[in-house]
Amino acid sequence: MPGLLHRLIATQPRPIERDTIRLELQPGREIDIQRVRDPRAKRIKLSVDERGARLTLPMRASLVSGDRFLREHRQWLSLQLAKYASDDSAAPLRRDQTASLLLRGEELPLSWTEGRYARLERQERGLVFAAPARASEASLRRALREFYEAEARADIGQWMPRYLPSLPRAPTRLRLKVMSSQWGSLSPDGSLALDLALVLGRPSAFEYVLVHELCHLLHADHSRNFWREVEARFPAWRDERTYFHAHGRKLKSSLRTLLGD
């Protein structure tokens, strides 16, 4: 029994360990870096997204080797952080100050008015945000998120029936979430997740991501057969991939800034 217990404990996956370290990027400027020790990692990796810098270490890597890797890539890190800073053109949501919001690739005018509860609606003249005078920032952000989710679900409801007849089954569940790097995912049980930031971009790009994930119901990988299915349903997918390369970072950054995530 002790031997069996020892083997069971040994086969349990080790948890991911996280902490925060500081790096002097240049004289007088220090930044926080999330350090992650991941059992699945095979090499030391440095990445930057809208949330900041992240250093990933395999379990076998020493902290000294991680520090050395950071120092060697200090210039690259500085350039990447500068790119994100320049792309982050959105400002946080502020009552009576935010004058427009991004939706489906357009900046729509936004007006503010008194209301019994926080809600955002689209009207002929643009967007109208109604809220009590003492509404908290959290309630305003929550109303904004609910608006974006409703708009995204409306788009998906319009597109989905077009593609379901040629698929073996429908997704079992749909979730809209703020995603760090991916635009969508399909789990083995058929649950579909899409990045809420998609509703900020042009509709054709959003539709492409939906088609891409639906085609994973046919092929779980990215084989030639998979791309053949995407091509048959959405021939202009390459244009949308180019769009994401050019504007994807800004879309994700804008949503996180607006929602305070």
Image (cartoon, rainbow, N blue to C red):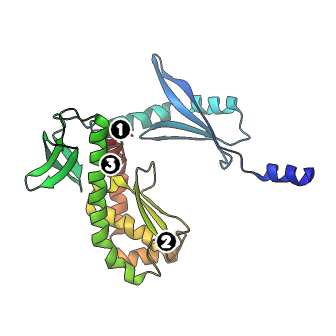
Reading the image, the residue beneath label 2 is 216
Q: Residue 185 in the image: x percent, y percent?
A: 47, 61
* 98 lies left or right of 82: left
Reading the image, the residue beneath label 1 is 260
Type of the residue with mark 2: His
Q: Earlier in the sequence, mark 3 or mark 1?
A: 3
Q: Return the residue nearer the eye: 99 or 146.
A: 146
Q: Residue 161 in the image: x percent, y percent?
A: 32, 77
- In what element is the residue under mark 1? loop
Report the disc number at residue 240: none
* 90 lies left or right of 121: right
In the picture, the quarter occupied by the N terminus is bottom right
Pointer 1 local density, CA inside 10 Å: few below 14, some 14–19, many at least 20: few
CA gap, disc 2 to disc 1? 32 Å
Residues tagged 3 and 2 counted as in contact (Cβ below 8 A) = no
Type of the residue with mark 3: Leu
Q: Return the residue nearer the eye: 242 or 109.
A: 109
- The structure residue drawn at horizontal position 27% and vertical position 62%, both measured from the top left corner, is 203
- In what element is the residue under mark 3? helix
Q: Earlier in the sequence, mark 2 or mark 1?
A: 2
Pick out the residue farthest to the front: 116
- The structure residue drawn at horizontal position 68% and vertical position 32%, both measured from the top left corner, is 65
CA gap, disc 3 to disc 2? 24 Å
CA gap, disc 3 to disc 1? 14 Å
Reading the image, the residue beneath label 3 is 251
* Position above or below: 70 against 239: above
Say if residue 106 shows up in the picture: yes
Q: Residue 160 in the image: x percent, y percent?
A: 34, 73
Type of the residue with mark 1: Gly
Q: Residue 213 in the image: x percent, y percent?
A: 44, 67
